[in-house]
Amino acid sequence: MKFPFFSTVAITSVLFLCFFGLNIYSGLAYELNPEAILLPPSWDNFLGTDRLGRDLLARVMEGGKISLTIGLVSAIITSLAGLIIGVSAGFFKGKTDKTIIILIDLFLTFPTFFLLLALVSYVNASVWVIIVVISITGWMGMARMIRSESFAISNAPFIKILKIGKVNSLKIILKYFTPILAPIFFISFTFGISGAILAESGLSFLGIGINPPQISWGTILSEGKEVIDIAWWLSFFPGLMIFIVTYSLINISDYLQTKTDSKEQHEA
C-alpha cells in the first residue's frame, strides 16, 4: 500500500486551518451582521453566513479547534487506558485478566453511543466533560487488542526467562512490550481521533453536546439542519470537514496496519 500522501496533506491542512487560520483570516466567528443573514458562499464570505449573519468560515475554524481538541485528547486518554489495561491483563493473567475481561464485557454490553447519551444527559456538557465521557466509553476496543497481543508476547520464551529471573515487571513491560505494541497503539490512536470527533459531532447535533457560546462542527451542523432547504452551506461545510478528517485518518490507519502486517510477515 502506498503512503497516503493526500490524506496526510489533507489532515495537516485542516489542523493548520483550524488552529492558525484565524490569525490570517479577518472574519470573526461571533460577530453578528443583520445585513448579511444566510448569504451563500462569495468572495466576501468564502463559505457564506449563518442565520445571524456570522461568517461561516470563521465559525468552522473556531469550531474545528474544539472538535479536534476533543478528538486528540480523547484518543490519547482512551489509547493509554486501553494500553495499560490490555498489557496488565496479558502480562499478569489469572485473576487480573478475569477481572479486566468482566469489566470490558460489562462496558460492551451497552451500545457505546447510547452509553454516551446516558452519561451526558446527567451532566452539564463542556469540552472536558465530553472528553471524559468519550474516554470512559472508548477504551474497550484498544484494551482487547492489546490484551490479545500481550498474551502472545508474555508466552515468548525470553519473557518467561525474564520472569523466572525475577526481573522487574515494569522494566519488562517498558523494554519489551512497548516497542512491539507501538504499531497497534498508533493504529488505535488514529481510529480513536476520528471516533471521538464523530461522537462529539453526534452529541452536539442532537443538542446535548457542546453548549453555546462555544461551537464545534457538530453544533454548526445542528444549527444548519433547520434551514438546510434554503442554506445548504451551513450543513455542507462542517460536514465536509468531519468527512475529510475521518477519511484521512482511516487511510492513515490502514497504511499503518498494512506496514505492521508486512513487517510481521517478513519477520516470520
Image (cartoon, rainbow, N blue to C red):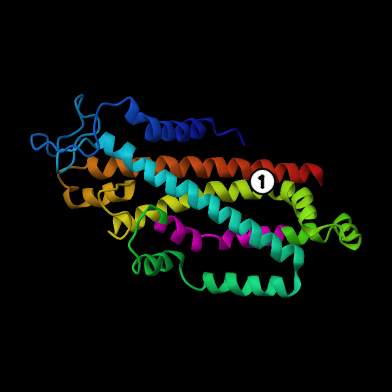
Residue under the point 33% across and 57% down? 209
Residue under the point 63% across and 49% down? 185
Quadrant of the rendered image containing residue 100: bottom right
Quadrant of the rendered image containing residue 235: top left
Query: Overall secondary structure of the magenta stretch?
Result: helix
Q: Is residue 142 left or right of residue 120?
A: right
Locate residue 71, reporting x and y percent: 45, 48
Quadrant of the rendered image containing residue 2: top right
The range drawn in magenta is 129-149
Check residue 43 for magenta coloring. no
Locate residue 77, reporting x and y percent: 54, 54
The residue that mark 1 highlights is: 183
Q: What residue type is labelled 1?
A: Pro
Q: Residue furthest left?
A: 35
Q: What element carries label 1?
A: helix
Check residue 130 for magenta coloring. yes
Q: In this view, does 66 lie to the left or right of 182?
A: left
Q: Quadrant of the N terminus?
A: top right
Residue under the point 76% across and 66% down? 92
Locate residue 255, reporting x and y percent: 60, 40
Locate residue 158, reporting x and y percent: 88, 55
As drawn, 106 above or below 23? below
Residue under the point 43% across and 68% down? 115
- Total marks shown come to 1
Q: Residues within 10 Å of mark 1 (few under 14, many from 20)?
A: some
Q: In this view, does 13 lie to the left or right of 78?
A: left
